[in-house]
Image (cartoon, rainbow, N blue to C red):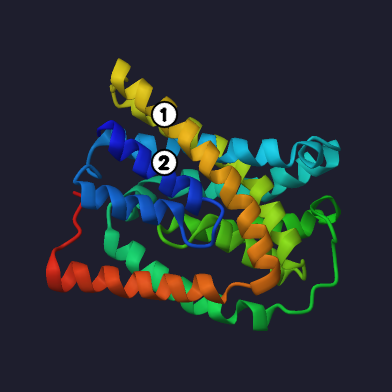
Amino acid sequence: MNTLQAIVLAIIEGITEFLPVSSTGHMIIASSFFGIAHEDFTKLFTIVIQLGAILSVVVLYFKRFFQTLDFYFKLLVAFIPAVVLGLLLSDFIDGLLENPVTVAVSLLIGGLILLKVDEWFNNPNTAETSQEITYLQAFKIGMFQCLAMIPGVSRSGASIVGGMSQKLSRTTAAEFSFFLAVPTMLGATAKKCYDYYKAGFELSHDQVNLLVIGNIVAFIVALLAIKTFIGFLTKNGFKVFGYYRIIAGIVLLLIHFFIHPLTII
């Protein structure tokens, strides 16, 4: 991986992390085109730079994030399903991460779902703010988030839809999804780093620099993306993202099967 590739991947992460389009899926595809997706450092990089993106949540929502212990307990309850399933299905998930076709199909199916989400869940009547979410609602949102273990599903998309299924407004569901990203991404990064070193790999000076650059770029881009997304989502809903996912999924499948296989193994 060179510096330009690192910056491009970080820009993709910053833009897509909090949009319902799957940041992991987009980075898998981008690194496949670069021809570096098979590298162990690339797999580490795409996880670790999520720290930069989630830091933007803490900065933008500083006053609302640092509040009551009750709110943190709710985040913990929502986080637990991802911990349990992530540990149980670790090898299976790693296999899916090496399959661009899985990403394309997930983008396509997720897009079809997003076209209908606003019709299915159009009557919010509970929790005007993320602090008012109940423990049961938090747990159910956490279960929805686990769907994002399939590359291309979108962590933010799954958890936002999960929130809306609990009769939260689009804005409240999106904000809770952002907050839930903090423990989720911290946990994913810690596990990936542990696995990387357990496998006997060490970071070179250049690789450390790439991680620093990636986190900085992802942080800056995510700051802009979150504000833009909240405003757009509140006003327009999910259909645009649904159409985008459908088009992206179809294009990727056509490229893979008719032009050049998108293989990363």
Q: Amino acid at mark 1?
A: Ile
Q: In the rendered image, is residue 88 in sight?
A: yes
Residue shown at the point (69%, 71%) measured from the top left:
235
User: Where is residue 26 drawn, in percent x and y?
Assistant: 38, 55
Q: Is residue 191 visible?
A: no
- Residue 111 has which mark? none
For residue 234, above or below residue 1? below
Pinpoint residue 188: horizontal percent, then vertical percent. Answer: 50, 39
121 or 218, nearer to the observer: 218
Q: Secondary structure at mark 1?
A: helix
Residue ranking furthest to the left = 259
Q: Quadrant of residue 199?
A: top left
Query: What's the residue type where badge 2 is placed?
Result: Ala
Q: Secondary structure at mark 2?
A: helix
- Tell me, for residue 10, which label it has, or none: 2
Q: How many marks?
A: 2
Residue 260 screen position, x and y as percent: 13, 64
Real-space CA distance between mark 2 and mark 1, rounded to the nearest whole angstrom: 8 Å
**Residue at left offset 37%, top offset 22%:** 209
Image height of 96 relative to 184, above or below: below
**Which label number is shown at residue 213?**
1
The answer to whether 193 is drawn above or below residue 240 in the figure is: above
Quick one: which residue is furthest to the top in this view? 205
**Where 49 falls versus 97 (above or below)?**
above
Nearest the camera: 167 or 27? 27
